[in-house]
Image (cartoon, rainbow, N blue to C red):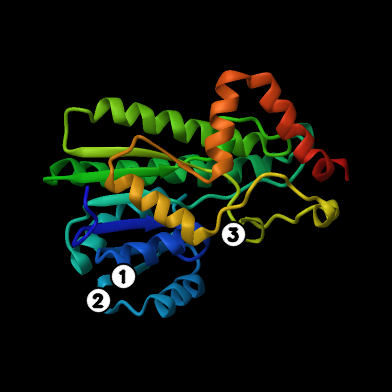
């Protein structure tokens, strides 16, 4: 689906990858509805965009199903019928073993990453199906196909998003709706602070051998993949390499990630 002149809804549009996706969409002459839980974050996106009436913002908690169900009509009123939805919003868990993870943290990650995505899909999909051409893209994670110790529940939610998206692809194959599952690797964002999670003190001395992708590059890769109607969009060299490695040697790739994360969990 070509992005120009399309109305695209983006969750997590106030920071990180989501903000850069909004800005990249605007550069490609789309109209964008940016959704975030924080007004101040959306205000900063608006300042950076300087896009006039091609950008509308909506402060919404995607874990609130009733609030999400009101969004399609609000977007239509300001921008027109939505042609695409890109679900970027997500949070990580505290860097602890599952055995030590509080139920409150477990439920919060599941509610944002999984139920938030489900709410958006259920709210917008009926309208997307009626469009001449449309697209639905959900951000999973490299952690959705490769186990990351200390992020086990996060990974479980992202694996669920990946498989749900693949299921939607199968269900929508005979419609005009394209579907993409997006798997970012390490991207240089503030997801830790935005998730309300503190990095372990040992992280300052942790030097990963895995490459890190800038959010600007991540946004370009994502939009390119959507325009090429790709089912799987791997963001970053690490995601591409570890996807292949996890398929060919799942035990070895798990050991590799465990060594990378060991210092983060030792404290």
Q: Indicate the secondary structure of the residue bearing disc 1.
A: strand
Task: Please tell me whether mark 3 sits on a helix, a strand or a loop.
Answer: loop
Q: CA distance from mark 1 to mark 3?
A: 23 Å
Give the crowd class for mark 1: few <14, some 14-19, many >=20 residues within 10 Å. some
Instruction: Answer with left or right where residue 91 lies relative to residue 20.
Output: right
Which mark, by number, is residue 53?
A: 2
Task: Describe residue 18's horizontal placement relative to residue 252 as left or right.
Answer: left
Residue 53 location, quadrant: bottom left
- Picture coordinates of residue 68, whole percent (x, y): 36, 53
Secondary structure beneath label 2: helix
Q: Label 3 belongs to which residue?
A: 189
Residue placed at 28% from the left, 64% from the top? 28
User: In this view of the protein, which residue sits in the foreground, 5 or 220?
Assistant: 220
Question: From the viewer's perspective, is residue 43 above or below residue 25?
Answer: below
Q: Nearer the viewer, mark 3 or mark 2?
A: 3
Which comes sooner in the sequence, label 1 or label 3? 1
Instruction: Determine whether 162 is above or below 78 in the image.
Output: above
Which residue is depicted at the point 78% across and 50% down?
207
Mark yes or no: residue 157 visible: no
Residues under labels 2 and 1: Cα distance? 7 Å
Q: Position of residue 145 (x, y in %)?
A: 55, 30
Q: Are marks 2 and 1 in contact (CB under 8 Å)?
A: yes
Q: Which mark is residue 56?
A: 1
Q: Quadrant of residue 96?
A: top right
What is the quadrant of residue 56 in the picture? bottom left
Q: Position of residue 144 (x, y in %)?
A: 55, 34
Q: Residue furthest right?
A: 267
């Amino acid at each position: 689906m070509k992005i120009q002149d399309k109305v695209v809804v983006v969750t997590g549009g106030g920071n990180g990858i989501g903000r850069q996706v909004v800005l990249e969409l605007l550069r490609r002459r789309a109209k964008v509805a940016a959704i975030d839980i924080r007004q101040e974050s959306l205000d900063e996106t608006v300042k950076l965009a300087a896009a006039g009436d091609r950008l509308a913002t909506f402060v919404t908690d995607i874990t609130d199903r009733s609030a999400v169900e009101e969004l399609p009509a609000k977007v239509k009123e300001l921008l027109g019928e939505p042609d695409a939805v890109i679900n970027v919003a997500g949070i990580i868990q505290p860097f602890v073993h599952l055995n030590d993870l509080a139920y409150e943290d477990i439920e919060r990650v599941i509610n944002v990453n999984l139920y938030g995505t489900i709410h958006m899909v259920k709210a917008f999909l009926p309208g997307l199906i009626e469009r001449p051409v449309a697209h639905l893209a959900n951000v999973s994670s490299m952690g959705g196909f490769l186990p990351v110790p200390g992020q086990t529940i996060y990974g479980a939610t992202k694996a669920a998003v990946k498989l749900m998206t693949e299921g939607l692809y199968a269900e929508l194959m005979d419609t005009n709706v394209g579907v993409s599952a997006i798997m970012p690797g390490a991207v240089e964002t503030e997801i830790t602070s935005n998730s309300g999670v503190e990095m372990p003190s040992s992280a300052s001395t942790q030097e990963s051998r895995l490459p890190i992708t800038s959010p600007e590059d991540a946004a370009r890769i994502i939009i390119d993949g959507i325009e090429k109607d790709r089912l799987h969009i791997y963001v970053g060299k690490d995601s591409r390499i570890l996807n292949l490695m996890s398929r060919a040697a799942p035990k070895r790739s798990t050991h590799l990630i465990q060594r990378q994360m060991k210092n983060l969990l030792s404290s």
